[in-house]
Image (cartoon, helix red, strand yellow):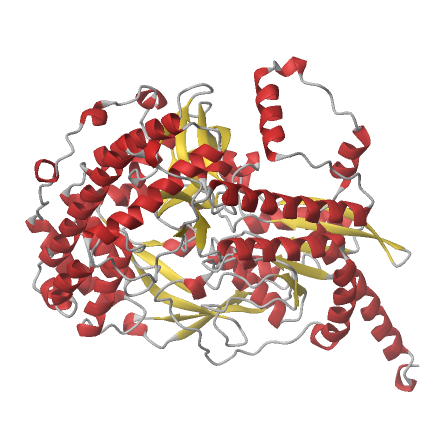
Amino acid sequence: MINKINAFELSRTFKTLLLLSCTSLATGVFAQEDTRHLNTVLDIDALYSPVESREVHGQTAMSLLEELQTKHYADLEIDDNFSSLVFDSLLDTLDGSHLYFLKEDIDQLSEYRYALDDTLRLGSVEPGYEIYNLYYRRVLERLIYAINRVENNVGDMDFSIDESITIDREDAPYATTSAELDEIWRKRLKNSVLSLRIAGDTNEEAAEKLAKRYRNQLSQVLKTNSKDIFQTYLSTVAKAVDPHTDYYSPRDSENFNMQLSLSLQGIGAQLTTEDEYTKIVELIKGGPAERGEELRAGDRIIGIGQGPDGDIQDVVGMRLDDVVSQIRGEKGTVVRLNVIPADAVGEAAATLVSITRDTVKLEDQSAKKEVLELTYNDSDYKIGVINLPTFYFDFESAQAGVEDYKSSTRDVRNLLEELKAENVDAVVMDLRNNGGGSLSEANQLVGLFIETGPTVQIRYSGIRNGFVRSFGDNDPEVAYAGPLAVLVNRTSASASEIFAGAIQDYQRGIVLGGQTFGKGTVQEIIPMDYGQVKVTRSKFYRISGASTQHRGVIPDITFPDLYDAYEDIGESNLDGALPWDTVRPVEYRAYHSIQAMLPELRNRHDERAEDSPDFIYMLDQIERTREAREREVISLNEATLKAEREADRRAEFDAENMRRFMKGLPLREWVDADAEEEEEETLASNDADALPAADDDSEVDAEDEEKDPLLMETGRVLADYIGLTERRLSQVDSLPNNR
């Protein structure tokens, strides 16, 4: 049995806890709705009972502190400052939107601000339980208020008056009285009803849906147990050290270890909880959700249905593990998700997505190639593109002596040979959305493009604190020596950053795209007597000496990146992230004069981008998404809200039509929202065989022919690079000493 697992070698370590993979739970378990919660008595004194800790929890707390102090990369001081950080983090974890605690609650609990370090050292988790128990009571009170209001007062709501609700309450003050908190929740409930009205529900239908939702939430909250509180508290303690350090109770350890497997059944996504919603963190490459192209990171799941026609069960406010268990299921079965898109605000924009559960295998994440044919400056180019979703390595097969085990380096080497046989003019390594993987694979992959040399440096903690070791490629064989580009974005992380940074430092290729994630740390999983801890043990540095931590890799030429609209993506946006720093560089040589060519390459790119329909559209889309996310209030006036949403839809429509006009594509016709909804309902009621065929085949063909604009621009940059390189070589050849 493996006692210690290098999390960087086995998984993308910056991810969150839960993969939607299959357990022994059968899908049919959830086919019948549990309606017991509908009769729950709405009395706080009858419902609330404080949850108590167990002796093993205190013992584990002491063990956790010891592991953090002796194993973590950073030198930790478990003192009052640490206690204050844990206190604030716990409050933020429980009530980040300030919707439950009153100011007097915070004042009362503040006696623990500088005491948590002392109690944890003594093996006591009681302060954590007291904080959580008060939160537990306040949540029950709010749910009782919500249920009473939606069951009795929806008909009294006036949607013609001008009032609004604050969207983001993270920086809002805590309510000073229960009446003030009631007013905040009155508007929240009115907003929920309004969203359902705009989606087509009557007041009665909205009231019925919301009553069921909040009663279901109440039922879920009442299942709170000692393990839940203990997991939340110790996880908060661990994450106060850095965002990638974490504690997992025995039950959550099982879920976490599931993510280390390379064969997973489910939809292939990762979830977290945010403001009562279940939010998609990431889609796993090769999984059914990613293949379906209907879901994306940031989408919020508000309902789940089993099978192609099962009732959609509301999951807003449901515990994350319960949501996960509903989405898990056997391969070949269907799950339907009601989803609010990432760039939408209310439930009126929700769409229904059907996904057939499947196994996410290593093969599905394998490297793949394509050849782009590009005409640029009256010349034709063939650009080979290798898409690498993750740095994978089949450890078990390799250890068992299987000759043809899966390896990203092996697969990329074979694809490079195929591309060379096709006489490509240049190669693009597409690492967009590649969250990392095996360190050894990153080293070997760099080795396919250089002779020999270092690829990464690692600074260790513990007894080797301060010791820096370099890793690299010792194989002089070069699989591909031609023009090279690396395409990255904000979710390219860890091993992707090692590869891109090394290629950039060696000036072996041009790095293009968006700033990478900035995860430059390595974690290990350390078993404990009760659960396990994931601890940051070391840190990555480029051969130039710069850390990839926090800053990531800055491209040589920047492309529009839709993730730029999301301020919460990237290591630099994580609370407590370790800082950027440097170590001494190692010796290495530059392969080409890319840095000298960059000013002209950038100028040529900027000139093209200024007139590019696709780049103009992407920049506009980024700005519109950013503006939507920065809105601080939502109108609770129905006419105003409808007008705002119609204006947003029109802006998106006009931007897309402008892009199509500039590219010579057929324009789309505007359809009012009401007419569009009626058309969708009509189509949905028809049999599939009765659906009319597309009237304009040329439009479909034209859209099918559209290529990824970022890949096409990468090809043009490479074409410029080829031309500049040939010009420099011809100038050198023409010098007198070379004749």
Q: Position of residue 496 (x, y in %)?
A: 53, 58
Query: On the picture, is 485 further left or further right than 502?
Result: right
Where does the image place residue 629, in percent across and percent down from the top left?
49, 54
Q: Is residue 69 left or right of residue 685?
A: left
Please, is residue 164 above or below residue 158 in the view? below
> How far across and down, in percent of the image, does residue 628 sit?
52, 53
Q: Is 355 left, or right, of 718 in this rendering?
A: left
Q: Residue at x 70, y 60 (%)?
A: 484
Q: Position of residue 239 (x, y in %)?
A: 29, 60
The residue closer to the viewer here, 204 or 5, is 204
Q: Is residue 724 visible?
A: yes
Asked where in the image residue 455 lies, by quadrant, the reply is bottom right
The structure residue drawn at horizontal position 77% and vertical position 39%, both measured from the top left corner, is 667
Judge whether 666 appears above or below 374 on screen.
above
Front residue (pair 228, 477): 228
Quadrant location, the N terminus: top left
Residue 521 placement, left or right of 625 = left
